[in-house]
Image: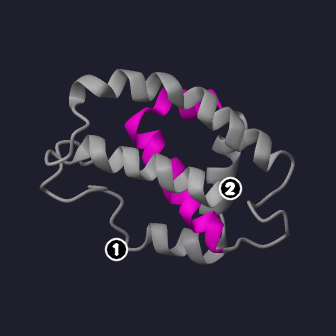
Amino acid sequence: MLWRELREIFKKYYKISLRFFVLQEKDRPAFVEGLPAKLSQFAAFLGENKWVGGGDSPTFADFVAYETFRTHKVFDGKSMADCKVLTAYLARFEALPRIAEYIKSDRCISSPIYSAMAKWQG
């Protein structure tokens, strides 16, 4: 369930950002308007759990979730800032020792999120 939902949100970002897809800039407000409800669903799913899988360690789904939520934070930071559970989730993921080390390294490329073909690159 979560994997499919995350994939759908990511596909919508992709469609908004690339000029070759049908979804245009005029569609961005409706997309952004619907995100708080979607983020609330993810926050409810995560609940008190540290990770998407509910365990003490992240799984592959957490990498997908992190990238999707990080993209959303760049795309529309207000909705993400209003969702404290997901903001804490992002911070927890970025605090993982190997992830934190990578983020601080010169190998980390945090932007652009999408290629030069994209209208919105992040």
Residue drawn at (58%, 57%) of the image = 4
- Magenta span of residues: 60-83
> On the picture, is 74 further left or further right than 7?
left
Q: Which residue is mark 1?
A: 106
- First of labels 1, 2 by sequence position: 2
Give the image's coloring scheme. Answer: one colour
**Where does the image place residue 59, in percent across and percent down from the top left?**
69, 73
Q: Amino acid at mark 1?
A: Asp
Residue closest to the eye, 115 or 97 = 115
Mark 2 closeness class: few <14, some 14–19, many ≥20 residues within 10 Å: few
The answer to whether marks 1 and 2 mark residues whose Cβ atoms lie closer than 8 Å is no
Real-space CA distance between mark 1 and mark 2, rounded to the nearest whole angstrom: 35 Å
Residue closest to the eye, 99 or 18 = 18
Q: Which mark is residue 87?
A: none
Mark 1 closeness class: few <14, some 14–19, many ≥20 residues within 10 Å: few
Q: Quadrant of residue 93?
A: bottom right
**Magenta highlight on residue 23:** no
Q: Quadrant of residue 98?
A: bottom right
Element under label 2? loop
Q: Which residue is mark 2?
A: 1
**Where does the image place residue 101, in percent across and percent down from the top left?**
53, 74
